[in-house]
Amino acid sequence: PSYLGKNTSSYCKMGASGELFDRLFGAGAAAYVSGFAVVVYGATASAQAKLGVSLLACALPALLSTELASGDHVAGDALANAWLQEFVGTAVMVALTCMPGALLGHLGYQVEWVFHWLMMMAADSLTGGNVNPLVSTTMVAAGRDSTKDWVVKVAAQCGGAVVGWKLLIAAGEFMRGDVGGPAPDPHLPLFYVFWSECLGGATLCLAVWAFATTSIGEVYAAKMGLINVTLRTIIVYFGATGPAVNPALAFGYDFAVDGSWPTMEQKSPSYVAYWAGGLVGAAVAGLVWKVITQKLDEKAQIGAGVALIGACLAAWIFVLAVQAQAIADDTAYGKAMAARHPVTKLFGRKPKAHREL
């Protein structure tokens, strides 16, 4: 009886707290929708932007309200907390990690790496969360999260990225560098932009698995440092797509600048690269890691993770990137030749940028 009584009391307290959370979350969701709508309708005259942001603002709390109304307070609370963490965490991540370059301009790769590492740790310490649809996808593929979790987290990440970019853009006048987002190289076929984000996304997700879910993750600075080294390598060498290795970050920038979600007609290379390529790479990384954890001990898991990271980097840097650069150079040269002044064409001169000194 004492055992049952103790559990019954605990259950009643949990149920009461769940009901209170439901009410507070409902009030907070209503305030969020109202506040977001006032800001959007006061800041833009674009009907498309108003419609897009209004749908974004209304859909997320509505999704969670449906979950919370299901009567499962524990699941509802967890789902709502995940949404809030991902929304705020992604906004903080975008604002902090993209700020040093915009604020101070180009400082050299070594200095930028240190700033990026520090800002990554600051954002992660403040909020935590996946803050990246690719990380959420690889978690689902490995069986660590459910599809329902993925929907809520990715929706929150997309909304949070818009807020983070808006904060940076609003502060642009105080910054020495430019505030800009990633974009696929317009000179490249879709094959190369797909594989750039696919291999880049797989590399990042493998780094998260190898360095954050093993004993290395117990040393916080080392874990974040190794993940950041991997990410900075992707940023430096995967230039065909920016890169982004985060669809929410890429599309959040377009939304923040244009006031509307990019359409397939306008941004088909971005959809192919950031969503198709990135998600495929993340899913494959998750499936592979699931097999690795079933077959190998921890030391072997770390070794396999590092080997796979090296293979993905080598496949892009030494094979596909070389081909992509040659295509980009040839395409740029061809366009420059076609755009020459008629007099220049008459004398058969090359475009100025392509003349040998």
Image (spheres, rainbow, N blue to C red):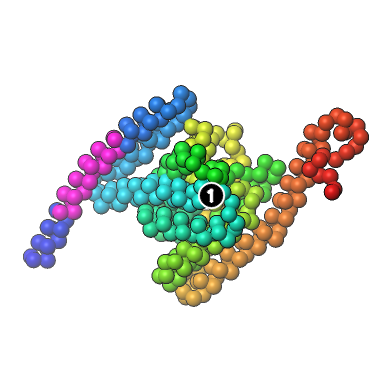
Q: Where does the image place residue 256, in percent across and percent down from the top left? A: 48, 37
Q: Is residue 20 magenta?
A: yes
Q: Which residues are magenta?
A: 13-31
Residue 80 visible somewhere in the drawing: yes
Secondary structure predominantly adopted by residues drawn in magenta? helix
Residue nearest the viewer, comparing 198 with 294: 198
Q: Where does the image place residue 8, in percent across and percent down from the top left? A: 13, 58
Q: Is residue 215 magenta?
A: no
Specify whether 204 is left or right of 236.
left
Q: Specify the farthest residue to the left.
A: 1
Secondary element under disc 1, as helix, strand or loop, is helix
Hey, what amino acid is under mark 1?
Leu
Q: Where does the image place residue 293, in percent across and percent down from the top left? A: 47, 69
Residue nearest the viewer, comparing 315 with 173: 173
Residue at 41% x, 59% y is 144
Residue at 38% x, 47% y is 88
Q: Quadrant of the N terminus?
A: bottom left
Image: 332 above or below 260 = below
